[in-house]
């Protein structure tokens, strides 16, 4: 009985060691990104998206780079694979990673396009209303002064 317990413990330890090894990258960060780019250039879009996802999940990236890679993955799903659900998920992810204005308008357009292609017209309209109301709120808070002291 004691030998059986030792055997079971050893097997569990071997399984745990084997599982943790899979998370360690075989390629460097730069090599992984280059591989994803090459797969894309060779029109292996599904494999390219998978490699970019691996790059996103394994390596420590700042928020801007995560947003850029998420945008690339979203575009692969949207434009090349016509997988609008996965594209939508990556575009929404960008809004949380990088909520700055320079990407916001473009990402909102992509989200609306995905929703339209998924025949979720009401959701697309709601997203469009939200994005235009945010634009109005931003532009409304910026008052300009013209000559003569009048403000707009």
Image: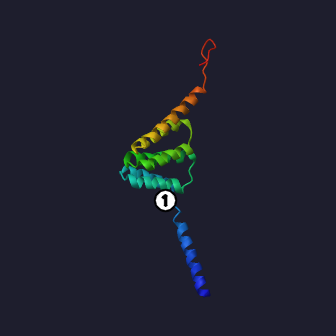
* The N terminus, quarter of image: bottom right
Instruction: Tell which of 51 and 5 is nearer to you.
Output: 5
**Image point (55%, 29%), residue name:** 136
- In the rendered structure, the answer to whether residue 5 lies left or right of residue 92 reads right
Q: Quadrant of residue 17?
A: bottom right
Which colour scheme appears in the figure?
rainbow
- In the rendered structure, the answer to whether residue 57 lies left or right of residue 115 reads right
Q: Residue 31, can we see it?
A: no
For mark 1, does the 10 Å Cα neighbourhood hold few (<14), some (14 to 19), or many (20 or more) residues?
Answer: few
- Residue 37 at x, y percent in the picture: 42, 50
Number of callouts in the render?
1
- Residue 106 at x, y percent in the picture: 48, 37
* The C terminus, quarter of image: top right
Residue furthest out toward the right: 149
Q: Residue 87, can we see it?
A: yes
Instruction: Tell which of 48 and 9 is nearer to you.
Output: 9
Question: Disc 1 designates what residue?
Answer: 27
- Residue 125 at x, y percent in the picture: 46, 37
**Image point (53%, 67%), residue name:** 21
- Residue 95 at x, y percent in the picture: 54, 43
Residue furthest out toward the front: 122
Q: Is residue 53 above or below residue 26?
A: above
Residue furthest out toward the left: 43
**Image point (49%, 59%), residue name:** 27
Badge 1 marks a residue whose secondary structure is loop
């Amino acid at each position: 009985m004691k030998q059986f317990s030792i055997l079971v413990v050893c097997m569990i330890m071997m399984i745990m060691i084997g599982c943790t090894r899979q998370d360690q990258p075989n390629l460097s960060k730069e090599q992984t990104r280059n591989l994803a780019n090459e797969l894309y250039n060779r029109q292996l879009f599904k494999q390219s998206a998978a490699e970019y996802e691996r790059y996103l999940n394994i390596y420590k990236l700042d928020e801007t780079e995560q947003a850029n890679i998420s945008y690339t993955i979203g575009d692969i799903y949207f434009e090349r694979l016509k997988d609008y659900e996965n594209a939508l998920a990556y575009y929404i992810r960008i809004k949380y990673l990088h909520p700055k204005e320079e990407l916001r308008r473009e990402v909102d357009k992509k989200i609306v396009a995905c929703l339209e292609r998924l025949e979720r017209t009401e959701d697309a309209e709601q997203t469009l209303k939200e994005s235009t109301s945010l634009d109005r709120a931003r532009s409304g808070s910026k008052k300009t002064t013209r000559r003569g002291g009048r403000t707009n």
